[in-house]
Amino acid sequence: MPLRRTFDSLTPLIARWRRSGGIMSDKMQRVMAAAGALVTKRSEERAPFLKGNLEAAHSARFTRRNRSQITVEVSVGGTVNGVNVDNYVMEMHEGDYNLGPNSRIKQAANPRVRIGRKFLERAVEASEDEIVESIEKLILGEIT
């Protein structure tokens, strides 16, 4: 089973949006799709590197549950190059280990991020303020 992190309803503004009677607009769909792309990119940047399978195993799925709720799910796992990487993903995300030589090279090339465990979790945390700000801007612009 792939590793997944879901984010939706990140701020009380979403409740305000729903109470306003507003229906999720195309703009909100674009904001949430951009949020999924941002978290995916940041998780790929933070993932350990051996052959590139962890980066390739990332995907974002955008679901509109009803007229006023959108969920974005970023997953890491599945089959990459004919190999099921689910167990490897969990080991690299949750395990304790020292970075291998390829990951150390990746770390040296990307000093602004930490490569290694909890890469997806840290990507969500690193992106949350930016995502909330985008949602706030959209909602305040749409409602006020």
Image: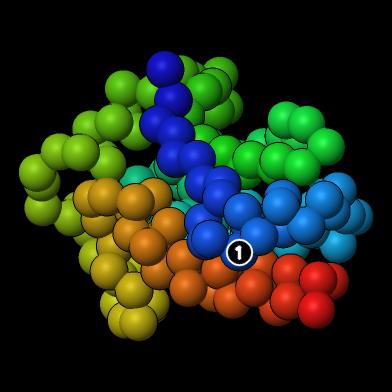
Residue 138 locus on image (x, y percent): 76, 72
Q: Is residue 70 left or right of residue 85?
A: right
For this rendering, which residue is in front, 79 or 129? 129
- Extreme right residue here? 26
Quarter of the view holding residue 105 = bottom left
* Label 1: few (<14), some (14–19) or many (≥20) C-alpha neighbours in 10 Å: some
The residue labelled by disc 1 is 13
Decide: is 64 above or below 34: above
Local secondary structure at mark 1: helix
Q: Quadrant of the N terminus?
A: top left
Decide: is 59 above or below 128: above
Residue at 44% x, 40% y is: 5
Q: Is residue 87 visible?
A: yes
All told, the count of numbered labels is: 1
Residue at 80% x, 79% y is: 144
For this rendering, which residue is in front, 129 or 126? 129
Residue 8 locus on image (x, y percent): 56, 47
Residue 142 locus on image (x, y percent): 84, 71
Residue at 23% x, 32% y is: 91
Residue at 72% x, 58% y is: 17
For this rendering, which residue is in front, 101 or 69? 69
Q: Is residue 37 visible?
A: no
